[in-house]
Image (spheres, grey):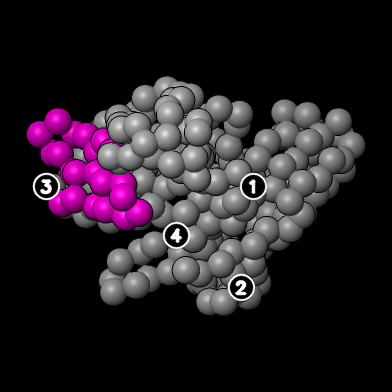
Amino acid sequence: GAVVSQHPSWVICKSGTSVKIECRSLDFQATTMFWYRQFPKQSLMLMATSNEGSKATYEQGVEKDKFLINHASLTLSTLTVTSAHPEDSSFYICSARVVVNSYNEQFFGPGTRLTVL
Amino acid sequence: GDSVTQMEGPVTLSEEAFLTINCTYTATGYPSLFWYVQYPGEGLQLLLKATKADDKGSNKGFEATYRKETTSFHLEKGSVQVSDSAVYFCALSRRSGGNKLVFGAGTILRVKS
């Protein structure tokens, strides 16, 4: 299957700093990528849909200025958590969408653990 | 809005035991239904899917049948192995919902030898 990588796999930062997380599709191109957030023992919550060459579409309740998304190429989307605070600590997961026989399938990255001190 | 409810875990079984993880959903229209598996340290992988009522998805010995009358998509396996230990997520998507995935909370499965 298609492979999606994320970097870094974990990051610890101080409150007030910004952190960038990369999501790459390694062996395919993806015009659409998704960013999710997962709290401990909870489900994945969709944060935003990232479209190559255009602005991301954010889900209700997600701060656009807080979580900056850039999808500059068909294989890379980045999520920047700006002015991070401890409540932003979470597991962030990306996925890349592929259309196979008119069917949409998402391939997921391994996730990035963010801890804000 | 759309939602997915899974049985809480962790589920602990002995090797070769029968597995059932319950999943029910709430959605308008006719969603597609999925089971994803997440092994330790890895990303979510699609385990199986069903796109219409009465469809049965199957893969690696796992099965789930799309039951519209009970809005359910329960995951089953006849004989689990230690290597099946993972977190299992039930999910749905709708074309009219932009094909966005809505996930259940996940169920941890632990299989002991």
Nearer to the camera, A64 or B11: B11
Q: Is residue A73 left or right of residue A59?
A: right
Under tag 3, what secondary structure?
Answer: loop
B71 falls in the magenta region: yes
A37 falls in the magenta region: no
What mark, if any, has residue A26 been given in the picture? Answer: 2
Q: Residues within 10 Å of mark 3 (few under 14, many from 20)?
A: some
- Judged by depth in the image, the label closer to the viewer, 1 or 4, is 1
Nearer to the camera, B79 or A25: B79
The answer to whether A70 is drawn above or below residue B39 in the figure is below
- Judged by depth in the image, the label closer to the viewer, 1 or 3, is 1
What's the residue at 36%, 46% (across, down)? B35
Residue A108: percent from left, percent from top:
53, 56
Of all chains, the one bearing label 4 is: A
What mark, if any, has residue B41 been given in the picture? Answer: 1
Question: Do residues under tags 1 and 3 come within 8 Å of each other at their CB atoms?
Answer: no
Q: Residues within 10 Å of mark 2 (few under 14, many from 20)?
A: few
What's the residue at 11%, 47% (across, down)? B54
Q: Residues within 10 Å of mark 1 (few under 14, many from 20)?
A: few
Q: Is residue B55 left or right of residue B2?
A: left
Question: Which span of residues is magenta-colored?
Answer: B55-76
> From mark 2 to mark 1, how far is it between C-alphas?
18 Å
On the image, numbered disc 3 is attached to which residue? Answer: B54
Under tag 4, what secondary structure?
Answer: strand
Residue A82: percent from left, percent from top:
78, 45
